Amino acid sequence: MPSVAIPKTTEVLVILTPKQGVTFQQVMAVIPAEILATVNLYLDGKIRQWYSRGDGKGVIFLLDAKTEDEARAIMETLPLAKGAVDGS
């Protein structure tokens, strides 16, 4: 029986939403810094693509990461995560 090659992970899909109980005002207070940090991660090649959720309740990132731990480490650098406002 031929062996099947297991593809290497090259990207991780991350869905970020605010934690339950976090207000819109709390999120909006951090948004300017969050946008700047997101753009910097994109320019550094860490974020390949990003999308806003259609329901307005978060974002979706496609990260250049090989593991879930690597993706979490990247996301933990964002201001919303540092302020414990997101629910990644």
Image (cartoon, grey):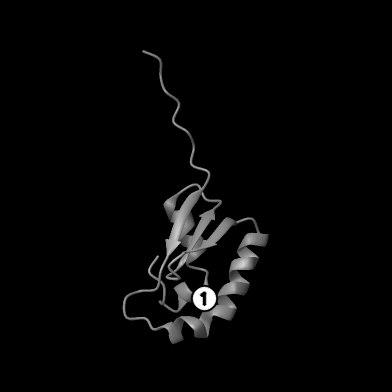
Residue 83 in the image: above or below residue 57: below
The reply, left or right, for residue 54 in relation to residue 40 is: left
Task: Determine whether, in the image, residue 28 is placed left or right of residue 23.
Answer: right
Q: Is residue 57 above or below residue 51?
A: below
Q: Is residue 38 left or right of residue 8?
A: right
Q: The N terminus is located in which quarter? A: top left
Q: Is residue 46 above or below residue 3?
A: below
Seen at 50% across and 47% down, the residue is 66
**x, y percent for residue 28:** 50, 83
Q: Quadrant of the C terminus?
A: bottom left
Position of residue 50 measured from the top left corner of the image (x, y, whole percent)? 55, 60
Mark 1 lies on residue = 79
Within-10-Å neighbours for mark 1: few <14, some 14–19, many 20+: many
Secondary structure category for the residue under label 1: helix
Q: In front: 52, or 45?
A: 52
Residue type (three-letter) at the residue carrying disc 1:
Pro
Between 37 and 15, which is closer to the camera in this rendering? 15
- Residue farthest along the right direction in this orientation: 43
Q: Specify the farthest residue to the top.
A: 1
Residue 77 location (% of width, % of height)? 52, 69
Quadrant of residue 5 within the rendered picture = top left
Residue 80, image x, y percentages: 48, 75
- Determine the residue located farthest toward the left in the rendered image: 20
Residue placed at 38% from the left, 69% from the top? 87
